[in-house]
Amino acid sequence: MLARSAAGSAEPGQNRTLIVVPSVLAVCIVADLRADAGPIGVTAVDKRPVDGPVQVGTQGLFGDVQADRERHGGLAQAVYAYGEDDAQWWADQVGHDFPPGTFGENLRVEGLDVNAVRIGERWRIGDEVLLEVTRPRKPCQTFARWIEAQRIAPATGWVKRFAAANRLGPYFRVLRTGEVRAGDVITVEPAPDGALRLLDWVRPD
């Protein structure tokens, strides 16, 4: 868990910290299919938060979709999570806010370093859902074009820049289906001994 400075009153000379419990800040699904210059012609990267519970199946969140199913989605990439701390870091870098869904993520989370996870680590979310880390996100030109379309940063060089920052976020497979919603607590079950760290895992082409 992350310790952050807490706002509010404190006695002079005292340091106050707030322990941020790992939790879901937002649950995001596709809002619209957007025209894209890639070979598919459209992209489902435009994810936005939804209110209330969302059902999670083995293929991902109900109501979500992937346009390029050869490279996105499937059992091993059913859910994608991104950390609020990483989104804030990017906001500082480029001078633009990154609200939940901007990275194409299904879950915006806080209270844990999503890039320090290990392959095989499991997240229990709320009372029902169980996810298992499978691999890091591999940025692509579709993502870069989306960032440019949002007037956040130029598409040229964005893939390398995003990868080099080592703030990729993990994909998950769904081991237990159920409902997730904003505010759900995340309980982390460590990966087996010797499991690769997320950022050490290289996805073969």
Image: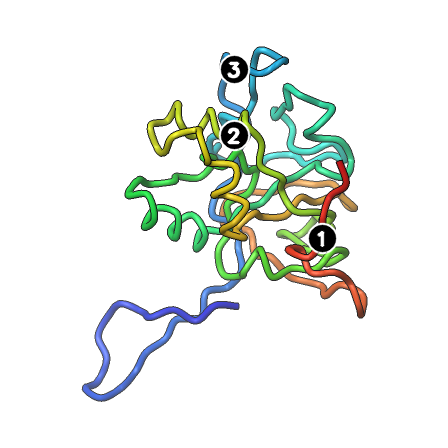
Decide: is 33 above or below 71.
Answer: above
Question: For this view, does 12 lie left or right of residue 202?
Answer: left
Q: How many marks?
A: 3
Q: Position of residue 105 (x, y in %)?
A: 54, 38
* Crowd rating for badge 2 (residues with CA inside 10 Å; few <14, some 14–19, many 20+): many
Question: For this view, does 82 lie left or right of residue 10?
Answer: right
For mark 2, what is the residue?
Answer: 143
Give the residue drawn at x 47%, y 48%. Answer: 25
Decide: is 82 above or below 61.
Answer: below
For mark 3, what is the residue?
Answer: 36
Q: Find the distance from the CA under tag 3 to the CA under tag 2.
A: 10 Å
Q: Find the distance from the CA under tag 2 to the CA under tag 1.
A: 21 Å
Of the image marks 3 and 2, the number of the one nearer the N terminus: 3
Of the image marks 2 and 1, the number of the one nearer the N terminus: 2
Secondary structure of residue under mark 1: loop
Q: Position of residue 3 (x, y in %)?
A: 43, 71
The residue lying furthest to the left in this view is: 12
Taking depth in this image into account, of 98 and 5 the one nearest to the observer is: 98
Secondary structure of residue under mark 3: loop
For mark 1, what is the residue?
Answer: 201
Decide: is 19 above or below 113.
Answer: below
Give the residue drawn at x 61%, y 26%. Answer: 64
Tell me which amino acid carries mark 3. Asp
- Can you tell which quarter of the image residue 189 is in? bottom right
**Which mark is drawn over residue 102?**
none
Tell me which amino acid carries mark 2. Phe
Tell me which amino acid carries mark 1. Trp
